[in-house]
Amino acid sequence: MPQLSIVIPTHKRADILRNCLDSIENQTVAKELEVIVVSDGHDDETCALFAKKSWSIPIQFLEIKKSQQGSARNRGIQEAKAPFCLFIGDDIFLEKDACEKHLSRLTTHDNTAVLGFATWDPAIGITSVMRWLEKSGWQFGYPKIARFAHATISKSMQHQFTYTSHISLPTVIAKKFAFREDITMYGWEDIEWGMRLRDAGVKLLYEPGAKAIHHHKIELKDSLKRMEILGKSAALLSSMIPNFDRLPQGWKLYAYYIAASLPTMAGRHRKAFLRGIQEKS
C-alpha cells in the first residue's frame, strides 16, 4: 500500500515529464510512492513515453479531453490509493528527500496541507525577469513566508500560497475539496481552492526542506503576456467569487495605476495586469 500518491497534470511536454518522473523514481521513499499522470488532452509523444519506458515505481497514465489543470488533478486524485497525496507540475523536479519531508510532516500534523519549496532550475538559464518574479512574489513568493519556515502559515494569508506546483495533503481532503472545473482561464484556480481549504479549517504548513526546482524558462515578453492573462482571469474570478481578494480595489488599484506608469520591471507588469482587467471589463 503506497503512502503518497503523486498527481501530475501534463500537456505536451513529454521530455520534461520524463525528467520529472526520473526525479520521483530517485526518491529516498520511492517504495512508498505511486504516481498518477493525467494528460490534459491527447499527445502522441506523451503516450509514446509510457509505451516505451518503464519505471521502478508504479505509474498510472490517464488521458482526459482537453480542459484545464484543475480537471486533470481531479481525475488523478480519483485514482489515488495512498492516505496522502502530492500535487506537482510536470516541470517540477524533486530533490531526493522531498517526498520523505512531505510524509514526515503529513504524518505528524492533522488536517494540514504541506507546501514544499521550489525555485528556478539554473540549468535552463535564469533571466532577470525570472529573478524579479521570484523576489516580487508573482511566481514563488517564498521570501514572503520565510518567517513561517517549518511552521503553519498565518490563516489570513495561507490561501495565497496553496501552490499546486508543490503541495501535499491528506487524500481524503483532496477528494472532498475538488478543483473548480468552471474556471477555464489560466491562473488563480489554486488560490480559489486554497480559500476553500482555509475556510474549512485546513492549515497550511511551509516545509522549505522539501525542495524542488522548476524547469521552465521565462523571458520578459512571456511574463508580460502571462500577467495580462492573470489580470483578465482575476477579474473573471472576482465576478464569480464574492470574497476573491486578488483583484486590487480602492487605494490599491490607484497605487497600481501609479506604479504602472513607471518604466520599471514592476511597472511594466502592473500595466500588463491592468490591461488584462480592462479586457475582461
Image: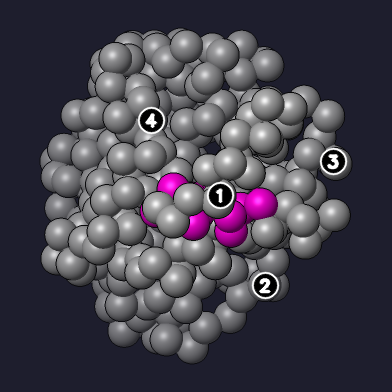
Q: Is residue 223 visible?
A: yes
**In the rendered image, which residue does mark 4 sit on?**
115
Is 114 drawn above or below residue 69 in the view shown? above
The boundaries of the magenta stretch are: 265-274
**In the rendered image, which residue does mark 1 sit on?**
260
Which numbered disc, 1 or 2, marks the residue closer to the eye? 1
Whichever of labels 4 and 3 marks the residue nearer the N terminus, that label is 4
- The numbered dot on residue 66 is 2
Name the image quarter holding residue 144. top left
**In the rendered image, which residue does mark 3 sit on?**
240
Whichever of labels 1 and 2 marks the residue nearer the N terminus, that label is 2
Q: Report the Cα–Cα distance between label 4 and label 2.
A: 28 Å
Q: Report the Cα–Cα distance between label 1 and label 2.
A: 35 Å
Residue 219 in the image: state x and y as whole percent: 36, 69
Name the image quarter holding residue 222. bottom left
- The numbered dot on residue 218 is none
What kind of element bears circle 2?
loop
Badge 4: residue crowd in 10 Å (few <14, some 14–19, many ≥20): many
Q: Residue 88 vs residue 75: left or right?
A: left
